[in-house]
Image (tube, coloured by chain):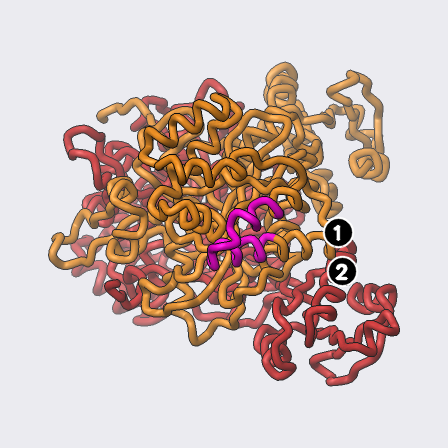
Chain colours: A orange, B red
Amino acid sequence: MNIQKPNIPKGTRDFGAIEMARRNYIFSTIRSVFALYGFQQLETPSMELISTLMGKYGEEGDKLLFRIQNSGEKAAEAPEKGLRYDLTVPFARYVVQHREEIQFPFRRYQIQPVWRADRPQKGRYREFYQCDVDVIGTSSLVSELELIQIVEEVYRRFGMRVCLHINNRKVLAGIAEVIGEPDKMMDITVAIDKLDKIGLDNVNKELSERGLNEKAIAKLQPILALSGSNEDKLNTIAQVLAGSETGTKGVAELREIFDLCRTAEVKLNIELDLTLARGLNYYTGAIFEVKALDVQMGSITGGGRYDNLTGIFGMPDVSGVGISFGADRIYDCLTELNLYPESMMDSTQVLFVTFGEAELRYALSWAKELRTQGIRVEVYPEPAKMKKQMGYADAKLIPFVAIVGGNEMESNTVMLKDMASGTQEALTIEQLVATLKK
Amino acid sequence: MNIQKPNIPKGTRDFGAIEMARRNYIFSTIRSVFALYGFQQLETPSMELISTLMGKYGEEGDKLLFRIQNSGEKAAEAPEKGLRYDLTVPFARYVVQHREEIQFPFRRYQIQPVWRADRPQKGRYREFYQCDVDVIGTSSLVSELELIQIVEEVYRRFGMRVCLHINNRKVLAGIAEVIGEPDKMMDITVAIDKLDKIGLDNVNKELSERGLNEKAIAKLQPILALSGSNEDKLNTIAQVLAGSETGTKGVAELREIFDLCRTAEVKLNIELDLTLARGLNYYTGAIFEVKALDVQMGSITGGGRYDNLTGIFGMPDVSGVGISFGADRIYDCLTELNLYPESMMDSTQVLFVTFGEAELRYALSWAKELRTQGIRVEVYPEPAKMKKQMGYADAKLIPFVAIVGGNEMESNTVMLKDMASGTQEALTIEQLVATLKK
């Protein structure tokens, strides 16, 4: 037999018991908040037709698609397939394909892995989970409010302090418009982003190097000097954008969102942040990013409004808004901040340790009774040496061991050992249940 | 813009809200039973190195592997990858790769999709979930008992009547051995399987056609006439197999498993079934299959003991036993038997319906309060026509609608309509919470 050294493809991961318990905690917390807002779960296939995926993520994205072939099938026989690259395009495809069955506004969430043939590096994997939540079929800004409330509640449950950065694509477009450089939107946001690091003079120099004329740079100065509360900032921006219909609409949307947040008593830190642009081309209104306040980590949640996501599949002019929680980064934050609850692990509560066939059978009877009481029980499956069985309990961090010997069988008890304190006492089954249920 | 008709690859499926709720119910039921027995969750990557997968599923299996290519990567640069074909080979790979971190006996479960390029047909998909549970690193038959107990408890929770068919590979090998036809094991089981349909004479005729001589067929007669209780059957088999060491060992294992089931008061229907062979080559001891009693459906759960699963990865002679629950078939059974609990859906409990901006804001405040009480709430995001909003609640089967008009705002109430009965009454927020929590 040819012996192989076992390994997995680079950029992929195995998740053992502790990682799975943590990941399940993250997913179930997020899911239960989504459900409070009436979002329902959707799952789409891991593979989509390659025609569904190609051209949706830019030239760079196309190169990062994983393509799938059947081993036994000739290429010509089967349409090409690829692994899901994100959850947004499959969602758009689903909405159009099932438009007759769906109630609009359609509220769905989706928690599934996606695959990208990126170069693997620290924190970047080729298979990772996204947790997306979207409302599609309404342009009401109440949906933006709800997503902000969801962010607030999810991180409240995690016990993490975060700040939500908000911007609006119409505002960015308006700025580019009023300074007469509609194509320079990205250059402007990149420059604003450097303000803290390199100072105003250097930013202006860089803007000039990027091809903005003096007049444009002059017009930008109030934007660069933006400070104060979100309202102060909005007032300044509103003045600058007075001449742009799009920009003025963007300001009005932001004002409305802030107003809705006051109505719903949102306590989350929200910061109007003009440096926030987000790369994806399909955003048309509000855009969001969430950052952790107590950990150095990039954006842990992000999204925005789009007005034509479903157009490519033949259903134009459907407005929607969505955000995506980055499970891997949230995992790293919670680990660094040590925020996982103790009750999260559903691991074994008690291990039965025995030294003979009769004792083993006695333990099996007790285990059956405990399990009907909802207690998670293991019986060491063979009467091995004491040291081996205790070592197993130790290594698996099982908190209690129930030892069964001749004396215990005679008195219809077990000797329960508390692995943390080392204390032990003889207990009847009723006493054992009571102790373990504490 | 090039408009595409949206579609998905053949053999794959989208799962909407109801399907997801049902699937989650199945998975969470199975998971919570696994946890009661101290099994912990493992997840492995969707893609494995092609060298891990090839040659493990026979020639036919190799042809059903989906291979993966990076779009932007030259074939020579990257090692070949393939989509997971089952959960057993990745489990074996994991055990060997992580042998230093694992506590043996290692108890793990794994609930993940697998992919096979089978020809799609009714009930057969190219992407489907498996729910595997295994103990590896002990040959104790207590593990067989535990898997039987898990089967009993899972189907008890589902409310399904099932029968567990049990056999032992050593018994099958022993029968082939004592009749002098060690290579004819499969022919014999196929023939026994036809006994009910074609009768003893025809079975004997068929055995002869399959190349068994008269003496061999004569020796088989007690096996073909097998009847009575499991114990009666075992006694007959024991006599036939007295000359075979392997066969006698198999009988002893079966007796031991039945005895352990009595100790643990297993109430499940268990039937010793010599026609049960299971195709996979790696089984060496007990083999199981579970069939529904009230639905026509193939095997819904199956597995067995293997003695050398990890050998190919360089870790020989590790005995284990496992079973796999077929989620898709269980789904179909529960649907046909109408066994899904009502409480399974975590869908919206109440929809707020409003007719103006002020009412919408009033509803947002109420919704916030209800959600802090754990109630799942939607607010229709825009003040649309009554008919449209009520139609939305109807189509989504939302049980209650809270209508907000000028009167309600003045009296600090909402008008709660019970969508099933059509009755409605004005409620304060405390009354509303109490009603919805009922």
Q: Are marks 1 and 2 in one subunit? A: no
Q: Which residue is mark 1?
A: A265
Q: Is residue A5 above or below residue A171?
A: above
Position of residue B75 in the picture relative to residue B136 (left or right): left
Would residue B92 be seen by someone viewing this image from the given angle? no
Give the number of the disc on residue B365: 2
Looking at the picture, which amino acid does disc 2 mark?
A: Ser
Q: Is residue B39 above or below residue B117?
A: above
Stretch of the chain drawn in magenta = A235-254
- How would you classify the magenta stretch by its main secondary structure? helix
Question: Dot 2: few (<14), some (14–19), or many (≥20) neighbours within 10 Å?
Answer: some
Q: Position of residue B161 (x, y in %)?
A: 57, 64
| Residue B413: quadrant of the picture | bottom right
Q: How many numbered discs, if any? A: 2
For the point 35% across and 36% down, the residue is A212
Chain under label 2?
Answer: B
Residue A234 seen in render: yes
Q: Residues within 10 Å of mark 1 (few under 14, many from 20)?
A: few
Question: At 58% across and 29% down in the image, what residue appears?
Answer: A333
| Viewer-proximal residue among B341 and B262 | B341
The answer to whether the residues at label 1 and label 2 have Cβ atoms under 8 Å apart is: yes
Residue at image location 86% in from the left, 69% down from the top: B412
* Percent of width and height locating residue B133: 50, 42
Query: Residue B23 colored magenta?
Result: no
Q: Residue furthest top?
A: A387
- On the rendered image, what quadrant is the C terminus of chain A found in? top right
Residue B175 in the image, given as x and y percentages of width and height: 33, 46
Instruction: Tell me the distance, in whole angstroms, between the alpha carbons under discs 1 and 2.
Output: 8 Å
For mark 1, give the secondary structure.
Answer: loop
Frontmost residue, B263 versus A157: A157
Q: Of the residues shown, which amino acid type is indicated by label 1?
A: Glu
